[in-house]
Amino acid sequence: MIKVLLAEDMHMVRDALVALLNLEPDIEVVAAVASGTEILPMAQRFRPDVAVIDIDLPGKDGLSAIADIQAHLPEIRTLVLTALGRPGTLRRALSAKATGFLLKDAPTEQLVAAIRSVAAGRRVVDSQLAMSAWDSAECPLTARETEVLRLTAEGLQAVDIAAQMFLSVGTVRNYLTTIVNKLAARNRVDAIRVAREAGWL
């Protein structure tokens, strides 16, 4: 029996997935959570074989939760299930050591097959998205620049970002200027849009 933890914040989607997966003779959903902060504690409690995780979750995003699982429970396989079918998102998921990546509009039988494959130790990636990722540009931002832009996208001001990242306000402003230039954006808001559309945020 393949034990599955499911992380999905939309109540109806989560319930439907639990019901569908539990119909399979070799799959049992042992835990279903609505936020990213619940993933690690529930994984530690139930020790699933596979964690099926949405990226956009409240509290903590799915990719950060996958990194937590890798750090504390590396034997658990992780399958990203997302509506964000962008090459940059796939790259970020693979960088976080996700074992699989599947789009939410995939047929149920494809999800079931992906769970079985991931549980068996194989990597599963949507083929069309894999080709797009192969052809698309790498993110030009450094990890620190990406973090500054992410915090800016969350509505933090330069002074708040400086305090959170232990930087000077001037350094944060320099980072933002560099980010805007690297992304060929008009301003910070446009830089956030460019990065989101590319799947870099």
Image: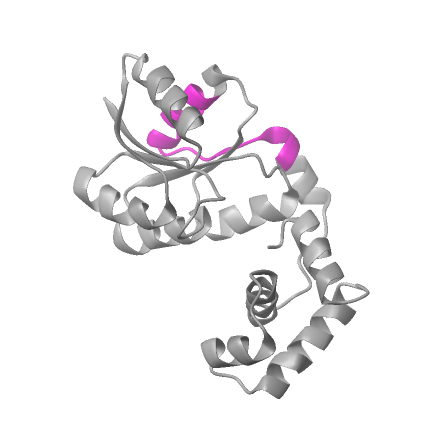
Question: For residue 192: magenta?
Answer: no
* Residue at (37, 47) in percent of width and height: 36
Magenta span: chief secondary structure:
helix
Which of 110 and 167 lies nearest the eye of the viewer? 167
The part of the chain drawn in magenta is: 111-129
Question: For residue 114: magenta?
Answer: yes
In the rendered image, which quarter is residue 3 located in?
top left
What's the image's color scheme? one colour
As drawn, is 17 to the left or to the right of 154?
left
Which of 183 and 96 lies nearest the eye of the viewer? 183
As drawn, is 56 to the left or to the right of 39?
right
* Residue at (69, 39) in percent of width and height: 132
Is residue 74 shown to the viewer in this render? no
Which of 109 and 116 lies nearest the eye of the viewer? 109
**Residue 165 appears at what percent x and percent y?**
48, 77
* Residue at (55, 80) in percent of width and height: 159
Q: Is residue 50 above or below residue 92?
A: above
Which of 39 and 190 lies nearest the eye of the viewer? 190
